[in-house]
Amino acid sequence: DVKVTQSSRYLVKRTGEKVFLECVQDMDHENMFWYRQDPGLGLRLIYFSYDVKMKEKGDIPEGYSVSREKKERFSLILESASTNQTSMYLCASSYFRWSDYGYTFGSGTRLTVV
Amino acid sequence: AQSVTQPDIHITVSEGASLELRCNYSYGATPYLFWYVQSPGQGLQLLLKYFSGDTLVQGIKGFEAEFKRSQSSFNLRKPSVHWSDAAEYFCAVGSDMRFGAGTRLTVKP
């Protein structure tokens, strides 16, 4: 089975800190995605990448950046964490460009910014 | 623009009863449609998907969904719910995977 691993299940950070969320997939998938999940809002796409060093903005990129230096790893960066970025963050990957076969998700990182 | 609406935020059913979760979409062409399930503390797992062809799609865990173009709907069904089906369910549409807000399912003993 494809595995998507997010390095931390829970994180607590202070306002203004630079935060790195790491995601690694083990099946040579081309495409990787970062979502945030909030109650009543479902999943909202932050950024995605369809190749190494490539990135595209999703629906809510403000306050975030990403890095994809290697195919298997996709990092989400909060440049200066704020309390409104407290959320569940989900990483996903897929082989096909247009997600015809759905995505494989990680278990999520619950980030609290205090 | 693509969008997905799940009208029911929370549904409670008794174990053994049938289940239908609603999903309505807005999309310009024939959509790719997906249902995912998220158990507490877990990531999302793909239940089933529709691309074309037979409008009744079978998925894992005994779930099925029916695509109705005339109603712009893709409702998820299960004939007999088990306690382990308690989870949050998400409908998603399109090539760039737009998600609905989710429906939380509670199963009564």
Image: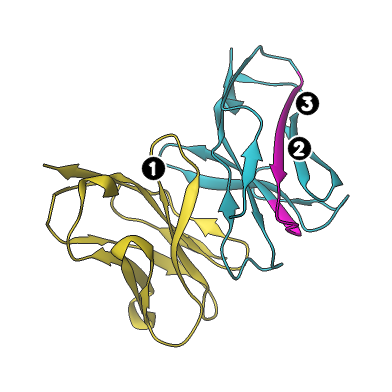
Chain colours: A cyan, B yellow
Q: Picture coordinates of residue A44 (x, y %)?
A: 57, 46
Residues at discs 2 and 3 in contact (Cβ within 8 Å): no
Please name the amino acid that badge 1 sits on: Ser
Name the residue furthest bottom.
B53
Q: Would you identify the image quadrant in which residue B21 lies?
A: bottom left
Mark 2 and mark 3: span between their CA atoms?
12 Å
Secondary element under disc 2, as helix, strand or loop, is: strand
Magenta segment: A18-32
Q: What residue did someone put label 3 on?
A: A79
Assign a secondary structure to mark 1.
loop
For the point 51% across and 39% down, which residue is it? A37
Distance from Cα at disc 1 to Cα at disc 2: 24 Å
Using the image, name the chain to which the residue with label 2 belongs.
A
Q: For this rendering, which residue is in front, A50 or B99?
A: A50
User: Residue beneath label 2, please?
Assistant: A75
Q: Amino acid at mark 3?
A: Glu
Amino acid type assigned to the residue bearing label 2 in the image? Ser
Quadrant the N terminus of chain A occupies: bottom right
Of the numbered discs in the image, which one, if any, rests on residue B39?
1
Q: Position of residue A66 (x, y in %)?
A: 78, 40
Q: Magenta segment: does it hold A30?
A: yes
